[in-house]
Image (spheres, rainbow, N blue to C red):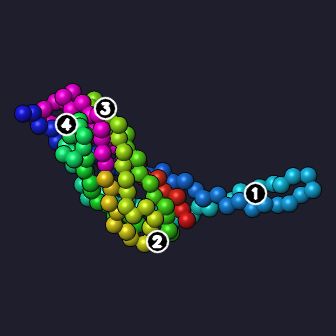
Amino acid sequence: MKWHRLLIGLCVVVTVIPRVLAVASNSTNATLIDSFLDVGFGVGLVASEPIKIAPDRDAPDPRHTYTGCGNLTLISSRSLQLSASATGTSDAGGKWDATIRPSVVAKGTTQLGICVTGKELVVELLVAGTTVKVAKVTITVVPL
C-alpha cells in the first residue's frame, strides 16, 4: 500500500479585521454614522510544528477524508474573537474545513487547538512516499 505523509502548514495567515465603532449623530434630514477604526493592538502566533493528518476512520468515506489537530500559542495585547478556515494547496484537492478552540481569548498568552479536515481528497494524485503540504490555514482575528 502506498503511503503519504500529509501536512497542514501552520505558517498561519492571520487576517485582522479591525472593529468599527459606530456612533449615530442625529440630524433633521438624516442619521449619519461616524466610524472610528480601533487599531493599536498586537497579535503573535507561535506554531510548534505542522499539523499531521490521517484518514478519518469515523467518516463515511475514510479513504478520501483526512483529519488532524495541532496546537499553537497566541500572544495578544487585547481580547480577541478567532475563527479559522482552510484551503487546499496540493493536487489532492478536496473540500477543507478548520476549527479553532477557544474562539474567544483574553489578552495575554493562550494555548489554541486547531483541527483541520479535508473531504473528497484524491491522494492517489500525490507522489507516494513523500511529505506533502496539502492545505493552508487562515486564522481571522477580530478585536473585542
- How many neighbours does mark 3 have within 10 angstroms: few (below 14), some (14-19), or many (20 or more)? some
Q: Where, by quadrant of the figure, is residue 37 drawn?
A: bottom right
Which residue is tagged 4?
63
* Front-most of residues 103 and 16: 103
Task: Give SS at disc 2.
Answer: loop
Which residue is tagged 2?
107
Q: CA distance from mark 1 to mark 4?
A: 53 Å
* Front-most of residues 90 and 98: 98
Residue type at mark 4? Answer: Arg
Direction from residue 58 to residue 104 in the image, left or right = right
At x 18%, y 28%, the residue is 124
Of mark 1 and mark 2, the one earlier in the sequence is 1
Task: Say whether residue 124 is magenta.
Answer: yes
Residue type at mark 1? Answer: Asp
At x 27%, y 54%, the residue is 69
Q: Where, by quadrant of the figure, is residue 63 drawn?
A: top left
Q: CA distance from mark 2 to mark 3?
A: 37 Å
Of mark 2 and mark 4, the one earlier in the sequence is 4
Q: Quadrant of the N terminus?
A: top left
- Between circles 2 and 4, the one closer to the viewer is 4
Q: CA distance from mark 2 to mark 4?
A: 41 Å
Of mark 4 and mark 3, the one earlier in the sequence is 4
Which residue is tagged 3?
93
Expressed as whole percent of the image width and height from the top left, the position of residue 2 reads 9, 33
Of mark 1 and mark 3, the one earlier in the sequence is 1
Give the magenta part as a residue range.
Answer: 116-137
Does residue 7 show up?
no
- Looking at the image, is 46 positioned above or below residue 138? below
Q: CA distance from mark 1 to mark 3?
A: 44 Å
Expressed as whole percent of the image width and height from the top left, the position of residue 143 reads 54, 62
- Between circles 1 and 3, the one closer to the viewer is 3
Task: Give SS at disc 4.
Answer: loop
